[in-house]
Image (cartoon, rainbow, N blue to C red):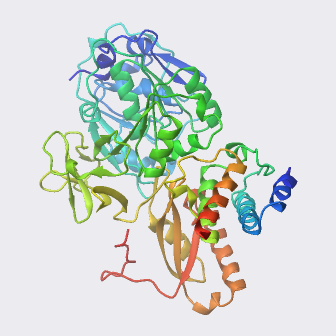
Amino acid sequence: MASLRERIAGAPPHPGAALEAWGQRLPLAELVAATGLGSARAELAGRSVLLRTRGQLGAVRCLVELDGLARRLVLCPPDLADEHLPGVLAAAEIDAVLTDALDAERPHPGVPIHRLRAPVQLSAAGDLPQVATEWLLFTSGTTGAPKMVIHSLESLTGAIAPPPPSPAARMVCGTFYDVRRYGGLQALLRALIRGCSLVLCEASEPLNEQLERLARLSVSHLSGTPSHWRRVLMSSQAQLISPAYVRLSGEIADQAVLDSLKAAFPQATVAHAYASTEAGIGFELEDGLEGFPDALLGRSGPVEMKVEDGSLRIRSPRLAAGYAGPAPPALTDAEGFIDTGDVVEFKDGRWRFIGRRNGIINIGGLKVHPEEIEAVINRHPAVRMSRVRGRRNPIVGSLVSAEIALADPQAAGSPERESALRASILELCRSELTPYKVPASIRFVAGLALTAGGKVERSDA
Amino acid sequence: MQQSANTTSAYMPGEASRVRQAVVGSFQQTAAAQSCELQPLADDLVLLDSGLDSLCFALIVAQLEDELGLDPFSDLDEALFPVSFGEFVQLYEAAARRSAL
């Protein structure tokens, strides 16, 4: 299997193709021909390396340097909390850290840190033995110890059609995702393997500037979550861009956002994809209809899908090989199907996504465990117990809603007392939780149903 | 600038005025709760320049659904997202008219 560097080098030529970040540009030719590892190249050979980068371009340089060189690379998302590092270092058996950051030391106890240097011509790529590198990616759950799954360049690029030898049309890709998460990594690999430019957006970059840049660089293929796209649709600068291909994944793409995109970009193909870090890309559809047709189930082919116990199951060579770490839980069932946990419902000839089995709430692509929020609410002295669920929202997919049973039901006996209690619980949540995890609505209930195991019932996810 | 919202509403029938007041109230409460600096709510204010982020808009839409029983964003007939504050209000006023039919 060719390394990422070799695959970029072998891509059809798009003259001047580059990664275009906010205020920074990295030509693909330089990415292939240069190295920033210096003498660390030999030291990193065969190692398990943590990639903790400040910027997206730094992450891309690290990926190209390490694929085929390191035994394992672990791509940290931009928001990985320091407190989780010791666990990550142990679970992934990290023996080196590679970073683009020039300043403060971060806590990586006992592990040598290497920094990317100014790129110099790579003289002999074949001087070190080429290995099949494991790619460890973080799943998108945001609480507790982060989980990693094991991919390979092959499983990550399985859904990408081989590029035509000579590009038929000019193609410039762009993405609202961060390349250090699965959706952005897909966009990155697609662009690199096709040899075309990719415009990267930064979370801190104002949307109008993102759109101006995407327009100036004539982006033709643009990807993001439905929430990213709703922001674009609400922008006065949306008409600046005229993509030929608009892609949504990472959240439920509802009919309203698909229709709105078709109306805003009539010249564009609007495609929605189902993908997760664990299951890879399940399907990509260009029919402009939410959900997916029944015909996709039970089909033979590289990707097999079925619905069992109400949730979507996928088997394909694009699945992760498993979870990383000692005694990892099984990723698939005995037949090799992964339970995505995404609950679907068949209605009017179409399967539609209705939520997550385990209650995980997807807020604009960020997944939230209800238990984390319940734990904070339950700390309030007036609260006996609570249940947090997702509430569908047309702007960010879902919001958090909470049902609360009080220790003393009379505590909310009057509208004034109820209002004061609600404010006090919200204040506690705001002090303990990031803003998107704070309940958008609170309802006081007389009691909450429990399962036989004594847990709060979540079967209606 | 705040006046322009009020001035406009004075010329509208009661229902439209009620909807506008609810929208204005929801923008102001959400901005305060999320510690965002809200720009004056003129009809030509571009929503993304209002000082509110996506989460704020999500919260506003949820609050208005609870308060007015209207969710025009999820309505398939509304294929265009509002860009300005005035369009946002119109979206809810139109939904209120439809629900009254």
Tell me if residue A34 comes above or below residue A377 in the rendering: above
Q: Residue at x 71, y 64 (%)?
A: B19
Q: Residue at x 62, y 92 (%)?
A: A410
B36 left or right of A33 in image:
right
Image spot of residue B44 (x, y percent):
76, 44
A140 left or right of A201 in image:
left
Determine if residue A202 is in view. yes
Name the one closer to the observer, A66 or A280: A280
Determine if residue A42 is in view. no
Q: Residue at x 32, y 41 (%)?
A: A285
Q: Residue at x 12, y 44 (%)?
A: A300
Q: Quadrant of the C terminus of chain A?
A: bottom left
Q: Quadrant of the N terminus of chain A?
A: top left
Tell me if residue A290 comes above or below residue A207 in the rendering: below
Name the one closer to the observer, A243 or A444: A243
A115 left or right of B13 in image:
left
Q: In which quarter of the view is residue B73 placed?
A: bottom right
Image spot of residue A83 (x, y percent):
49, 51
Tell me if residue B12 comes above or below residue A249 in the rendering: below
